[in-house]
Image (cartoon, helix red, strand yellow):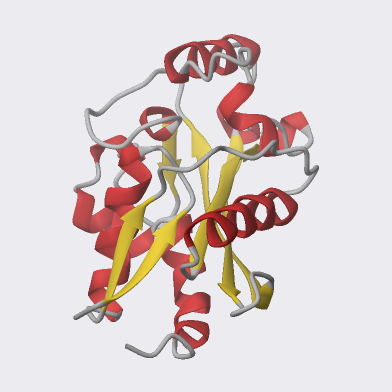
Amino acid sequence: MPRRVVLATHNPHKVEEFAAIVRATRPDLEVVGYDGPEPVEDGVTFAQNALIKARAAALHTGLPALADDSGICIDVLGGSPGVFSAYWAGHAKDASANLSLLLDQLSDVADPHRTAQFVSTIALVVPAVDGGAAAEHVVEGRWPGRLALAPSGENGFGYDPIFIPDGQPGGAERSAAEFSPAEKNASSHRARAFVALVPLLSTLSV
């Protein structure tokens, strides 16, 4: 029976994406969604927020917990929205409003200055038998690119429709929302972070 690992998010898109990434390298692990209370994410870095979520999920479930804190960092905005990506247009976490506000803020910024990167920080917290944390690890992945002038594509979520990843075959200029799920899972910021996480998952024996 696969060893279960809880992903500390109520976002079904993230659960699906993580499960596919994990399945490709560790089919013996089963990623399950988290149904417990959400902790207050009051960290000021991706790593701090990822650890807050992973610790809460591990404590609530007793399972090894993964948590991803991610966002888009735009060079001309000094790295913002960053950790505030999900709340850029307010605490309603309205992805469409976030995207529209960001495009409006950058409406006069020329293409050479629209460079950005998606950042994913993944925390792994393995609970101890006494309820504390036996081990904690944090890894990071970055996906460089730039922002389009308008959204395109039906796949993905969040800022994917306006993010054009660097290094596409043949010089293509597709948004992340135009990537197939398999393409995205092979090259995204989460996939890159997971590459660094794989050796740490070896401690989770079936």
Can residue 203 be seen here? The reply is yes
The image shows residue 58 at horizontal and vertical percentages of 55, 62
The image shows residue 51 at horizontal and vertical percentages of 67, 58
- Which one is nearer the viewer's eye here, 97 or 75? 97
Image point (41%, 56%), residue name: 188
Q: How many marks?
A: 0
Q: Is residue 59 above or below residue 154?
A: below
Left of 190 or right of it: where is 29? left
- Which one is nearer the viewer's eye here, 8 or 158? 8
Q: Image quadrant for the C terminus?
A: bottom left
Q: Quadrant of residue 162?
A: top left
The image shows residue 27 at horizontal and vertical percentages of 22, 78
Q: Image quadrant for the N terminus?
A: bottom left
Q: Is residue 163 above or below residue 140?
A: above
Can residue 170 be seen here? The reply is no
Left of 32 or right of it: where is 67? right
Image point (55%, 13%), residue name: 92
Q: Is residue 111 above or below residue 30?
A: above
The image shows residue 88 at horizontal and vertical percentages of 63, 20
Image point (20%, 57%), residue name: 182
Image point (49%, 90%), residue name: 203
